[in-house]
């Protein structure tokens, strides 16, 4: 849908508020586990399932929602996401036990699946060149910085007002976002013929992702050689193979794998997946300092305050570096700095005070690296997406974030608990950290190999060229 509308700061603010609602219910929940458990009288296992459900459902539906946004309207799908955010948060506010908690978390996951790709697509549609890079910087502040902001704010709100107030604030932000973007014209691809959707692809994808998530999360408890675990592994592998083979032959597919023929887009997406998998560091480090070093939850949270400050400060810096030297350099250095920050947190042999300082510095480097990486990576993925598939491409990119984080956390937690059960928590923390260092190294390599030196310098021309080189009737809707 063509219009002469140019994006405004009001639109950017509305989108950032919408993105922050995700982090208010995603990250803040991690910090209030004891309070939720005590208030609702539910088991630790149930609360862990509730936490993981949001990322799982977001990851499962984000590509479908991105494709729908292209077809039926990016503003419309953003609104759907914000309305679902209100409903999901309301379920948690009214929860008296596990039922509404689980339902609310599922709804919130689907809400995030709608909001993330649709808002990126709106920014692609209504901003160009440096204006788009600036807009994406603020989107990254809401997305990457929102994790730190909502982690800190969630802890403070839960301590002084009660944990349910987190979700009341989430509702307020969602309503403000809806009001701020209400005057934005609709943006969608003008398609021909009747509306079609790849339901079979979505079904295969959902089964595969559930099997993978359960395998990683509960494999250790079930036993890695138990029949159920083996069946889950087989379902995951077979499901992935079937999904790829079925989708690549479809005219209307859930994921158009031809997107990955564009090396800059593929490099940004792969590195995004791997760098988000490093989120497992947060679980390992926070658990270790509480269990192994006797920190309180509040003290543990304060260790990461440097991450919050630095990631917020560096996102705009990453944007300026992108505009000066292109995307590859800040993406590479961002991944390297993040990996170094993670690595030094694994020095668990250090004495208490020294280790505390090292972890604080590690979190600062973690935020510094992610802040430098965020905008160049997002801009590389968006600018290299065909104009008629921005929502879908953004959905795949953000799916990489959600699934990377979910898988990274699950693997790190499993490694930590398995090693801790057999030995010391110090060794468990070091091994868990090493897993995340490997993710960081692989992320850096994917950027070096796939992202060209001139990425980000000719983004609009690349985008237009990509739009004309893709088959127009293969929109994954």
Image: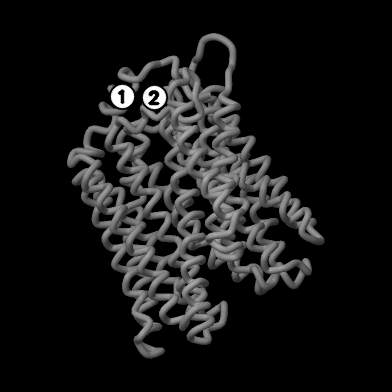
Crowd tier of the residue under label 1, counting other residues whose Cα lies within 10 Å: few below 14, some 14–19, many 20 or above: some
Most foreground residue, 244 or 198: 244
Q: Residue at x 73, y 56 (%)?
A: 101
Image colouring? one colour
Instruction: Residue 461: give x, y in percent of width and height.
Output: 26, 26
Most foreground residue, 39 or 41: 41
Is 445 above or below relative to 79?
below
Is 344 above or below relative to 62?
below
Q: Which residue is mark 1?
A: 466
Disc number placed over residue 58 in the picture, else none: none
Q: Residue at x 35, y 20 (%)?
A: 470
Q: Quarter-wise, where is residue 333 in the image?
A: bottom left
Q: Are marks 2 and 1 in contact (CB under 8 Å)?
A: yes
Most foreground residue, 422 or 132: 422
Q: Residue at x 61, y 47 (%)?
A: 109
Q: Quarter-wise, where is residue 235 in the image?
A: top right
Q: Is residue 379 visible?
A: yes
Counting labels gives 2
462 displayed left or right of 76: left
> Please, what secondary structure does the residue beneath circle 1 have?
helix
Is 430 above or below relative to 230?
below
Q: Residue at x 38, y 77 (%)?
A: 359
Instruction: Residue 302: give x, y in percent of width and height.
Output: 49, 76
Q: N-terminal of the two: label 2 or label 1?
A: 2
167 displayed left or right of 302: right
280 displayed left or right of 380: right
> Please, what secondary structure does the residue beneath circle 2 have?
helix
Instruction: Residue 30: give x, y in percent of width and height.
Output: 59, 64
Compute the Cα span from label 2 to label 1.
Answer: 8 Å
Q: Which residue is mark 2?
A: 387
Instruction: Residue 122: give x, y in percent of width and height.
Output: 47, 33
Crowd tier of the residue under label 2, counting other residues whose Cα lies within 10 Å: few below 14, some 14–19, many 20 or above: many
């Amino acid at each position: 849908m063509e219009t002469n509308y140019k994006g405004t700061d009001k639109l950017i603010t509305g989108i950032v508020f919408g993105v922050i609602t995700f982090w208010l219910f995603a990250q803040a929940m991690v910090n209030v586990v004891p309070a939720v458990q005590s208030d609702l009288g539910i088991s630790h296992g149930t609360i862990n399932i509730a936490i993981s459900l949001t990322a799982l459902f977001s990851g499962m539906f984000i590509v479908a929602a991105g494709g729908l946004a292209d077809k039926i309207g990016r503003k419309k799908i953003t609104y759907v996401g914000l309305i679902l955010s209100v409903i999901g948060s309301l379920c948690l506010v009214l929860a008296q036990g596990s039922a509404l908690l689980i339902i609310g978390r599922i709804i919130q996951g689907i809400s995030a699946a709608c909001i993330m790709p649709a808002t990126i697509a709106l920014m692609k549609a209504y901003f160009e060149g440096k204006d788009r890079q600036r807009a994406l910087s603020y989107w990254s502040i809401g997305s990457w910085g929102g994790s730190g902001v909502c982690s800190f704010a969630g802890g403070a709100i839960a301590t002084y007002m009660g944990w349910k107030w987190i979700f009341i604030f989430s509702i307020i932000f969602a309503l403000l976002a809806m009001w701020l973007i209400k005057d934005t014209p609709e943006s969608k691809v003008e398609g021909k013929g009747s509306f079609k959707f790849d339901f079979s692809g979505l079904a295969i994808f959902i089964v595969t992702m559930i099997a993978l998530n359960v395998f990683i999360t509960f494999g250790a408890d079930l036993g890695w050689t138990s029949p159920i675990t083996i069946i889950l592994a087989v379902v995951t592998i077979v499901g992935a193979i079937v999904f790829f083979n079925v989708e690549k032959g479809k005219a209307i597919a859930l994921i158009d794998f031809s997107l990955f023929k564009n090396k800059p887009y593929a490099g940004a997406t792969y590195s995004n997946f791997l760098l988000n998998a490093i989120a497992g560091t947060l679980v390992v480090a926070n658990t270790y300092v509480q269990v192994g070093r006797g920190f309180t939850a509040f003290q543990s949270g304060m260790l990461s305050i440097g991450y919050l400050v630095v990631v917020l400060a560096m996102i705009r810096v990453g944007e300026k570096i992108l505009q000066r030297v292109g995307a590859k350099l800040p993406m590479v250095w961002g991944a390297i700095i993040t990996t170094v920050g993670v690595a030094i947190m694994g020095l668990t042999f250090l004495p208490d005070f020294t280790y505390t300082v090292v972890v604080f510095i590690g979190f600062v480097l973690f935020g510094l690296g992610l802040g430098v990486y965020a905008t160049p990576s997002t801009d590389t993925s968006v600018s290299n997406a065909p104009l008629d598939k921005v929502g879908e491409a953004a959905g795949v990119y953000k799916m990489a974030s959600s699934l990377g984080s979910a898988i990274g956390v699950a693997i790190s937690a499993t490694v930590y608990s398995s090693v801790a059960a057999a030995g010391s928590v110090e060794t468990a923390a070091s091994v868990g950290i090493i897993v995340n260092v490997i993710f960081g190294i692989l992320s850096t390599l994917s950027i070096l190999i796939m992202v060209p030196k001139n990425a980000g310098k000719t983004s609009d021309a690349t985008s237009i060229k990509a739009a004309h080189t893709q088959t127009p009737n293969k929109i994954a809707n």
